[in-house]
Amino acid sequence: MRGKDETTGEFLGTSRSQQRRDALDVLELAQRLVALPPAQLAKLPVPEDLHPHIAETRRITSHIAHKRQLAFLAKQMRREDDEVLDAIRDALDAGGEAARQETALLHRAEHWRERLLDEGDAALAALIEAHPSADRQQLRQLVRNTLDERKRNKPLHAFRELFRAVKELLEAGEPGDDETA
């Protein structure tokens, strides 16, 4: 019910202008989802009931029909909770929490790789202590191969493999395991 509260003088509910702004925000989010490639869309926390609507919107090429279908998708999205829409926005946002966590993981993996190459066995022991499930032999071999590549000025294949192995190890571990790094 809209209008003013008789006792306090405050407006009840949101104004039509605010409702319209919210609807346009959801429409913009729908446009961003439709523009994403399917692989990237699969990584987002989009509810399963919206996937067919997104696929249908992509399929339609006629301008007016596409616009109509996009409006329908936005209508379906407005039925979702605000938390779901905020999670989708956050995952899409380059500066969102998910992106920050991914960037932090990459930085930790880079730090461990450099530490393994600089300190050798001491860093390997610290990494094994922080992540007991790590394959010591594989990591030692990758470190050895990377150092050999550097000496011979060869392409950095083992360097990248070491990064991947450390990153997978950090992803598998619980958050905060490698705080000592």
Image (spheres, rainbow, N blue to C red):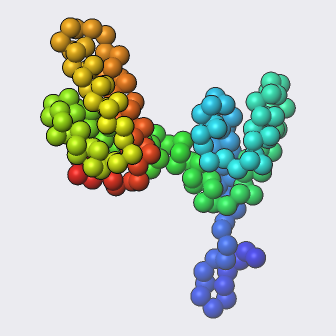
| Count of marks, rendered view | 0
Above or below — where is 77 with respect to 119? below
Picture quadrant of residue 112: top left
Residue 136 in sight in this render: yes
Q: Position of residue 149 (x, y in %)?
A: 25, 13
Residue at the farthest bottom position: 7
Is 27 above or below relative to 153?
Answer: below
Residue 111 seen anywhere in this rendered image of the structure: no
Whole-percent x, y for residue 144 in the image? 24, 22
Q: Nearer the viewer, residue 68 or 153?
A: 153
Q: Which quadrant holds residue 66? A: top right
Residue at horizontal 82%, vertical 28%? 60
The N terminus sits in image quarter: bottom right
Q: Residue sitting at 27 percent across and 53 percent down? A: 179
Image location of residue 18, percent across then percent down: 63, 60
Viewer-proximal residue among 106 and 18: 106
**Residue 83's spot in the image, x, y percent?**
60, 60
* Above/below status of 124 relative to 174: above
User: Viewer-proximal residue, 11 or 82?
Assistant: 82
Q: Is residue 81 left or right of residue 123?
A: right
Q: Is residue 53 left or right of residue 85?
A: right
- Judge left or right: residue 7 versus residue 138: right
Residue shown at 57% from the left, 52% from the top:
87
The residue shown at (71%, 57%) is 80
